[in-house]
Image (spheres, grey):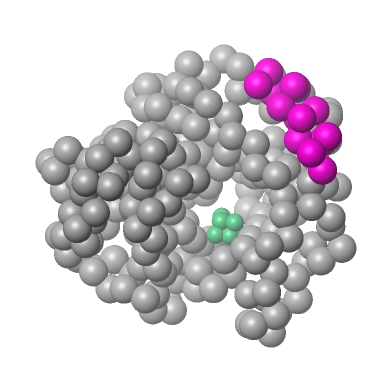
Amino acid sequence: MVGNIHSLESFGTVDGPGIRFVVFMQGCPLRCLYCHNPDSWDSKQRGQYQLSPEELLAEVMRYKNFIARGGVTVTGGEPLMQAEFVKEFFLHCREAGIHTALDTSGAIFTPAVRETLDVTDLVLLDIKSIDPIQHKALTGAKQDNTLRCLDYLEEQQIPVWIRHVLVPGWTDDDGLLQRLADFLRPYKCIEKVELLPYHTMGTRKYEQMGMDYPLKDTPPLSAERLKRAQEILGM
Ligand code: SF4
């Protein structure tokens, strides 16, 4: 079994607790309007690395001392497009005593995905929009699988950090944020909600790929709006 890996980062600090070795998997079924990694979309494109779970673990072990209080995060793209590979890799990490986090949109929900979630220490679940119509417009996909995934994580009591990008003119809306807060409140598996302010960094990739950036007229999120969103989410 070989994973198609877009890229690796040895010292990540924003994707889960502590210092983390971050694995970016190639391929994503979503097309978020604000995506900063359009080069990770095509699952048929070869990423920088083609590694077996054992080879990837060997790479991680080179940094074991640095990530001792953190761990490994697998993100993308959408890592659950290669759920079986991630499961095998996480099983190896568990044996080696390394904490595992999975950053996913939850857009794929299959038996193989559930098996992968079962061996994950922490799920960083990206809820792109709480409103089904806006979710489709923002990502090109329905939100149903994301919500099924959250219900499964609740059933299994697998720890979750919710991630939500605040996009001016889209998700940055008091009414939607209140709906999100009300929706998330009953879930006991949720340890934390991370609100990620939309920014315009990363648009250069679109230029390099000869693509139009769909949100080119959208300004970055202001500090005031971030504060307001944090208040609504009770943070
Ligand atoms: S889920 Fe992530 S990688 Fe996929 S399109 Fe959205 S932002 Fe980009």
Image point 49% across, 45% down: which residue? 14
- In this picture, residue 177 sits left or right of residue 158: right
Q: Which residues are magenta?
A: 222-235
Image point 37% across, 76% down: which residue? 48
Residue 81 visible in the snapshot: no
The percent coordinates of residue 173 (x first, y second) are: 83, 35
Image point 82% across, 43% down: which residue? 222
The percent coordinates of residue 155 (x first, y second) are: 39, 22
From this viewpoint, which residue is outermost toward the front? 66
Image point 69% across, 41% down: which residue? 129
Between 155 and 63, the one lying in front of the other is 63
Ligand 1 quadrant? Answer: bottom right
**Residue 17 is one of the magenta-drawn residues:** no
Image quadrant of residue 130?
top right
Position above or below: 135 against 97: below
Helix, strand or loop: magenta stretch: helix
The percent coordinates of residue 135 (x first, y second) are: 70, 46
- In this picture, residue 129 sits left or right of residue 190: right
